Image: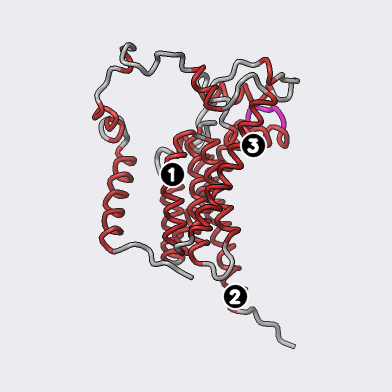
Amino acid sequence: MRFEFTPTFRLRLSDLAIVSILAAFTLAIRFRTLQEVEGGGDAVNTWYFVRQWFSGIDFGSLRWDHHMTRFGMNVPALIARAVFGSKATTYFVAPMGACVAAVILTYKIARDWSGPYAGVLAGLALAIFPPMERAGCQLLPGVFSAAYNALAAYALLRYWKSEGRREAWVVACAVAIFFGYLAHEPNVFLIPGLAYGVWLCCRSKRHVLLFLMTLALLLAAETLFYLIFTKYSSRIAVTLVGHHPGYLTTANPEAQTSFWMLFDRYDGALETSWKLLIYGFLGAGTALVAYGPVRARG
C-alpha cells in the first residue's frame, strides 16, 4: 500500500518549514546583534519590578508608575523568569520571543493576503529592520506591541476570510489588541480602526458589539485588579498620579509646545529606516483607499 501526502498536508508541512526557518533566522539575527542589558531607564526598571514578584512583593504598598502597569510586557518577562531562573541572560528571553512572534505573524498576514513569497519577504524585512536590534533584546514595549498588534491584525484577516460562524476571531482580535494596550497605552488608538475593520468585513453590528463588549469586560477585569490588589482605582489613576497635577498644562515650560511639534518625531528625530516605513505606509494606504474598500462577506 502506497502512502501519499494530500495537497493540504503538503501545504501545511511547507508552511511549518517556512515558519521554522524564519524563527531560526530571526533568533540568529538577534544573537548576532545582541546588545548589553541597559544599565538604566525603563528597560532595567521593568526587569527589577518583575524580579520583585519573586520576593513576596506587596502590591498594596507599592508606589506604582505607568511602566509597572504594562502587564502585556511584564507578564511574559515574569513567565521567562519563572521558567529560566534569575540568571542575567533570562532578561533577553521575553523580548526575543516577542520579536520571533511578530516576525511569524507578519509572515502569516502577508502570506494569507498575497501569497507565500510576500509572506517570506515581509517576515525577513521585519527580522532585519534596524530598530529591531534594540527593540528585540530590551524590555521595552515596542516589540511586544508589534507582536500583539500583528496578532490582532491576523485575527481580523482570518475573520474576513472565514466562512460561517466567525465570532471566535472577533473575540481573538479584541483580546490581542487589549494585550497590546497592556503592553503600551498608545495602542488604544488602534481600537477604532479594528472596530471599523470588523464592520467592513461583513457589515455585522452584532460582531462590532461583540468586539467592543469583549474589550469592555477585559477593561473591567483590569480595573478590578487595581481596586483589589493596589491602592489605586485604575491604570489611569496610576498614570495621573505619576504625572503630577499641572504637568500637562501650559504653566509647565515642558508643555509649552505647538501642535505641529507633535510631528517632529516623524521627521528629524527618526532613523531613516523608520521614515521609509512610515512614508511607505502612507503611500500604500493612499493607494488602498484609491483602489477601494474591502468588500463585505457573508
Residue 157: image x %, image y %? Answer: 48, 60
Q: Name the residue under label 3.
A: 221
Is 88 one of the magenta-colored residues?
A: yes
How far apart marks 2 and 3 lie (CA) works out to 41 Å
- Residue 196, compared with residue 12, is above or below; it is above
Residue 8's tag is 2
The residue sitting at the bottom extreme is 1
Look at 49% across and 39% down and name the residue there.
143
67 vs 232, nearest the viewer: 232
Label 1 amino acid? Answer: Leu
Q: Is residue 205 left or right of residue 280?
A: right
Q: Earlier in the sequence, mark 1 or mark 3?
A: 1
The disc at residue 284 is none
Does 152 sit left or right of 75 as displayed?
A: left
Residue 190 — which label?
A: 1
Which mark is first along the chain, 2 or 1?
2
Q: Look at the image and give the residue range highlighted in magenta.
A: 85-90
Identity of the residue drawn at 75% across and 20% down? 56
Determine the CA span between mark 1 and mark 3.
20 Å
Q: Which colour scheme is used?
A: secondary structure
